[in-house]
Amino acid sequence: MNKNSDFLYKNLKDKTIAWSESSNKYLILENTTALIFKKLNTGVSIKEIASELSKELSLPINKTTDFVTNLKQEINTLKTEKDASVLKKDTRINKPEKFEFIKYYKINELVFKVEFHSEYELYLIHPKFEHLEIEEINIHAHTFTIFCEADFIYFYIENNFIGAWNKNEIHFFQGKFSMELIQKIHQKEEKEWMGVFHASAVSNGKKAVLFLGDSGNGKSTSLALLQANGFTCLADDFVPIDIYNKEVYSFPASISIKKNSLDTLLPLYPELENSAEYHFKRLNKVVRYLKPNNLDFLSHLPCKDLVFIKYEKNSDLKFDEIAKIEAFQQLVPDSWLSPIKENAEIFLDWFASLNCYQITYSENKEMIATVAKIFNDEL
């Protein structure tokens, strides 16, 4: 790992990943471009670098100057980009006096009281955690409060302001809710997490495998099939990994099942027949929720395998190792990654150590058998 001022660099074969501390952004560069990138960041002038490049590549000086200037602009952009999705200051909005819904969720031995001002706020959180709901109880560990005012949704814990998000960016609020939940469940502060990945984590009791896939590729369906065949669902859609042991930690949300997967899953999960259906217009999808089979939401396991999974009708089973850069490009955009420099370095080293695969299948039994081989190190 090379360190340089605001940036970290990680070489992966013929590419280099650059990370900016200012913006917490990752950039994939050709190795030769990365060398120029580093020079610019150590204060070498555009003119000097362009002149060296012109001689080395036998290119006109105006061409190399344009190239280096554009790269410098990209660096400046990375250094100034900030996430403006959340209001971080308490704007002293008066909290409602009455909450239409108050729910209690039990996760292991912890009880969370969550106050929802209206059905709108309830809809954003409750469906994924309904299986954890218990009757009202006097003793609870934490109180989460959620309400809307004007165009913002406000979030408090124990009457302490956490943040406010524009209604157009509700997914940021939902991510923060889940982040606060895992901190309380696992007794780890945000700075102790390497990242949270938009993936599914499956375990065999000894280790975990991460499954990724674009929406509609069958990731959650594959998870439900694996859960019905002896594997455990550690987490779905929100997979936290810590910085100390670099292990996947359990997250207690339900598995989201799309309507077109019901025919496949109903024989295994007849309870889906009568479960509530939720319409998410922003995502253009209709889902039902399936309870995970994990019985210990404190569990955490090592992970060395990343699998991109895709259901393709009438396809023969295809299993291939894929390039790490290709896997990185698919993993990072939808993930929350720690903005702390030491954590970013740990993430890049952890990612470089992963085995990256791709499975395309149409026969469920073949997919399950292949996943079993990954767990048993037989591939």
Image: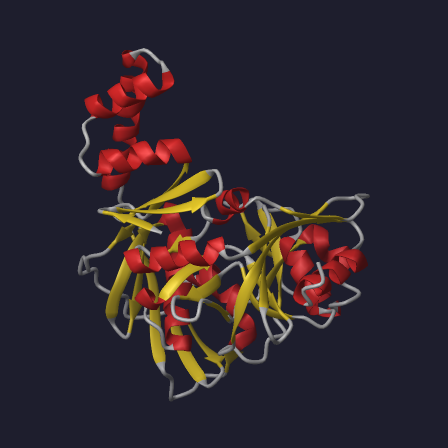
Residue 107 rendering spot, x and y as whole percentages = 48, 79
Residue drawn at 49 percent across, 46 percent down: 328
How many marks do you count on the picture?
0
Query: On the image, which quarter does residue 245 sit in?
Result: bottom left
Q: Position of residue 370 (x, y in %)?
A: 74, 59
Counting from the top left corner in percent of width and height, residue 65 is at 27, 18
| Front residue (pair 281, 323) | 323
Residue at 58% across, 71% down? 207
Q: How is the image coloured?
A: secondary structure
249 horizontally vs 377: left or right: left
In the depicted structure, whether residue 298 falls above or below residue 33: below
Q: Residue at x 41, y 76 (%)?
A: 186
Residue 263 in percent (x, y) is at 77, 56
Q: Quadrant of residue 149?
A: bottom left
Q: Residue furthest bottom?
A: 138
**Quadrant of the rendering where the C terminus is positioned:** bottom right
Compared across the picture, whether 303 is left or right of 290 comes to left
Task: Tell which of 304 and 298 is nearer to you.
Answer: 304
Q: Is residue 357 visible?
A: yes
Q: Nearer the viewer, residue 12 or 222?
A: 12
Residue furthest out toward the front: 56
Instruction: Give the side of residue 313 with respect to residue 340, left or right.
Output: right
Pick whichever, 358 or 189, lies toward us: 358
Residue 8 position (above or below residue 52): below
Is the residue 138 above or below the residue 118 in the image? below
Whether residue 115 appears in this view of the structure is: no
